[in-house]
Amino acid sequence: MEDPAKRKELMRYIVFFVRMYRPHAAREDTVLFPEFKELVGEKEYNELGDKFEEREVRLFGKSGFEGVVDKIASLEKKLGIYDLSQFAPSKVATDK
């Protein structure tokens, strides 16, 4: 993406997405999935995991989710947004 204005706008939307997604993912990991696992039981939870894994291979191919992640990383590099540190806020003086 050569247009600096478009790149800046894209980065702004990515920052908004990350700001929204972090608490969502944290809630899934700390509340939703542990409760779900307790509700359905260990055996059924593992069986569901196997079914999701099979579907992942059908949808994304042999490389599965990891292959998609690699493709996204490649696109991020082409767009110049792969280095996430460029979006991180700078450390404040009290963080010494």
Image: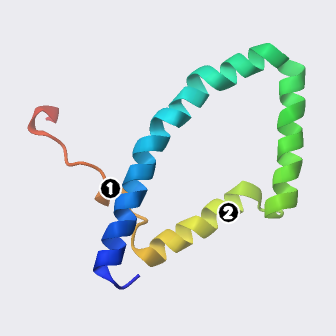
Q: Residue furthest left?
A: 93
SS for dot 2: helix
Residue 62 in the image: state x and y as whole percent: 83, 62
Closer to the camera in the image, 2 or 74: 2
61 left or right of 67?
right
SS for dot 1: helix
Closer to the camera in the image, 49 or 16: 16
32 left or right of 4?
right
When asked about the image quadrant of residue 11, the answer is: bottom left
Residue 56 in the image: state x and y as whole percent: 81, 53
Residue type, numbered disc 1: Ser
Tell me what residue is drawn at x 54 percent, y 36 percent. 25
Residue 89 in the image: state x and y as whole percent: 24, 48
Going from N to C along the chain, the mark reached first, 2 or 1, is 2
What is the crowding at mark 2: few (fewer than 14 residues within 10 Å), some, or many (at least 20)? few
What is the C-alpha distance between the residues marked 2 and 1? 22 Å
In the displayed structure, 57 sits above or below 5; it is above
**Residue highlighted by disc 2:** 68
**Which label was assigned to residue 21?**
none
Tell me what residue is drawn at x 52 percent, y 35 percent. 24
When asked about the image quadrant of residue 47, the answer is: top right
**Residue highlighted by disc 1:** 85
Residue type, numbered disc 2: Val
In the displayed structure, 84 sits above or below 8; it is above
The reply to whether the C-beta atoms of the residues labelled 2 and 1 are less than 8 Å apart is no
Location of the C terminus (image quadrant)? top left
Residue 12 in the image: state x and y as whole percent: 34, 60
